[in-house]
Amino acid sequence: MGTFALLHTLVPSVNGIPFLVSVAVTALFCGFLFRLREHLVAAVFSLSAAAGICLFAFSGMLLNGFLSLWNQLAEVLGKKAGIYLTIYQLKDSGKANGELAALIFLGIACGLLGFLILKLRWYVLLLLFAAVLPVVLVKTSLLPDTRLCLCFYAGTLLELNYMTKNKGGNLGNAADVSAFIAGAFGLLLVSVFGGVFLQSLVPKNEYQDSQLVANAKEEALSGLSRLRYKGQGANSLPDGKLKQTGAWSASSDTALEITMEHPASLYLRGFVGSVYDGSSWTEISTEKAYEEKDLFYWLHKDGFYGEDQLQNARNLIQDDSLSGETGTISIKNKTASSKYLYTPYELSGLPDGYTGENAQADSTLYARGLFGERTYRFSSLGNLVSDFTTLGAKVYQTLTAGNNAGNGGADAVNSYRSQESYYNTFVYQEDTALPASLKTLFQKELGDGGNRDEGHTDYYTAITRIRSYLEKNMTYSSQTDVFSEDGDFTENFLTSSKIGHSVHFATAAALMFRYYGIPARYVEGYLITPQDIEGKQAGDTIEIPGTNGHAWTEIYVDGLGWIPLEMTPSYYGVMEEANLKTGLEAKGKLAASIPETESQPPVEENIRTNFSLKLALFGIEKFLLLFLIVFDTFMFLFILAVIFLRTFTNRKRRKCFASQDTKLAVRAMAGYARTLYEHGEQYSQETTLLYKKVTKIGQKAAFSPHPVSASERHDTASCIRHLKKELKASASWYDRWIMKYIERLY
């Protein structure tokens, strides 16, 4: 049921009838075979052989079916969760029959696995599987079928109950059986009818559109994020959630410890927001990113990443006055959020594990691991921000000339020009979006923003106009109130409150640049100021306090890449800044600085989707190999755990039985005898009488002040031997294995 709930949620077109029927038939058949325990090994061998023959005979159909389901799953995960999986090219013929065969085979596997989990009482596997569904739902933001989920979790509770009761392979006495059946029936009725009632009361579409539900989900995810990354102690950077922004608070404690090979003043970029909705900044949606997956696969294949574009542009020109020295930077995150990797604009290559076709278009680098990363290192150039106008002008000349102005070579120039043109087009499509209400407001406050269909206002004019407006009309203050009302955050800042800190100024400035047709984004991170590196040598530790947490605006300079700009008046002069009157006067063109090209890159045959059957089989082979490795590792650890626990239990038991204190030894042996006796169902009259005698001896040892004789100790030991002998004689090999290695009864 849980597997079907997952399939139905991720691939709604899946036909559940053949899957569920195959699960039920397999489970019933396994139950039948389990009763023929003396023939179980032969039956399992025969079934395995039959399964192998079927796999060989119908391999083509099954492969086609599984890959068809895989492709549908990959589309959903790519659009909803940003998880990119390989999509395989398949023949349309026989697709429906292939999916049917795959579902039947999958149902058989689920039925067999479920039966083994139930019989072997693998509590951990059951609980882990039960946790898969909520994780997938949170990751994809999909809504499951309520009734399916209720039935699944009701069944999970019943399985746990069964595992608890079923100690020896049976349900126990008649009272246990009645209680189990009554509980199962009651739980099933409550789950089904409760699900129907809930779905009738709150229809799925209303639930999905409910603002209350959305707010509750957002609060839950925010709380979980704070617990995972523990970033609230350094400062009050809101991670783009503008309506959670109140008074600015920051700790003077160290947020980051940085070691630099060449100490330099840098902007360390953390969160980057591209999409503005009036209350928050977010990255581009996973669905939009998935639509552009081929574009970014093509760009990343040739090593073009937005995160290190500034360094690539620098390598195209020859100018000794600009930073060209690459050095290593090590960061130890003390109290800042561990959700991000804080990296400079001058990054000279992405950290390990962030390159490849699955890298996202945005510049936010999320830390790996459940709780993020606290230590990492990368290589970077020195500060280029102070020289970006000069750099931008020379890159422009190099690209438009189409020749080598430095040491990059003509091929490198042409390659960069082609790659930047496609990325440039994407940036203008995504990072110039502006709400209509703000466009009207900016037109009133800033005047004519130019014709965005023709190009953008020149950078110098836009920067000076925006700065002048913010300086004249807005007041900087760290003491601001939370804007929790309905309406636009920026509009409230510009027209009502007119008071804010860096979050407010950076947000307003980014949107104003978009009004002038210039791609812009909102950024949160940390500043390594000239004061922080004063007197520092290579290898010295630079302590960055929480007060250096900051929000700023970045704009995209055609041909050059993303550049940070300080738009908060109180922070003017804190960081090095280029001479804005030099090199920024030229009026920009839409997707400027290079010849016009197609909006999409050339699609190379077999890049993503046109994979041969050989590649498909290779992918499945790798998956099976990984599965075997994981399974073998689990089995190895399982065997070690069994050996250790059995050795520990037996040693502890022998130590108690051999105690010099006769009463202590007899109490331990009598308790052990009681455990053995209760585990079995029927014993000989002689053993039963002996057990009753030992019970009284045990009570005497526990509660009576009278001593226990040596003969009574001998009778207790003899009772244990008789109980174990008869218990093993009446049990099957499977039960004996469970009693010996899992329950550790002997």
Image (tube, helix red, strand yellow):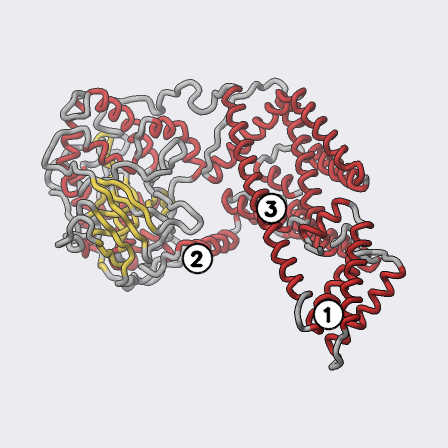
- Residue, disc 1: 666
Above or below, 158 relative to 101: below
Place of residue 258 in the rendered image (x, y in percent of width and height, measured from the top left): 25, 51
Mark 2 / mark 1, whichever is N-terminal: 2
Above or below, 27 relative to 101: below
Q: Residue furthest bottom?
A: 705
Q: Amino acid at mark 3?
A: Ile
Q: Nearer the viewer, mark 2 or mark 1?
A: 1
Secondary structure under badge 1? helix
- Residue, disc 2: 227
Around disc 1, counting alpha carbons within 10 Å, would you say few (fewer than 14), some (14 to 19), or many (20 or more)? many
What distance separates the C-alpha of mark 2 from that of mark 1? Answer: 51 Å
Q: In the image shown, does 740 or 395 lie closer to the viewer? A: 740
Circle on res. 639: 3
What distance separates the C-alpha of mark 2 from that of mark 3? Answer: 35 Å
Place of residue 63 in the rendered image (x, y in percent of width and height, measured from the top left): 60, 24
Residue 527 appears in view: yes
Residue 440 appears in view: no
Place of residue 349 in the rendered image (x, y in percent of width and height, measured from the top left): 28, 36
Around disc 3, counting alpha carbons within 10 Å, would you say few (fewer than 14), some (14 to 19), or many (20 or more)? few
Secondary structure under badge 3? helix
Place of residue 49 in the rendered image (x, y in percent of width and height, measured from the top left): 71, 27
Tag 2 near tag 3, CB within 8 Å: no
Q: Residue furthest right?
A: 685
Mark 1 / mark 3, whichever is N-terminal: 3
Q: Residue furthest front?
A: 710
Q: Amino acid at mark 1?
A: Val
Q: In the image shown, does 567 or 309 lie closer to the viewer? A: 309
What distance separates the C-alpha of mark 1 from that of mark 3? Answer: 32 Å
Q: In the image shown, does 52 or 75 lie closer to the viewer? A: 52
Around disc 2, counting alpha carbons within 10 Å, would you say few (fewer than 14), some (14 to 19), or many (20 or more)? few
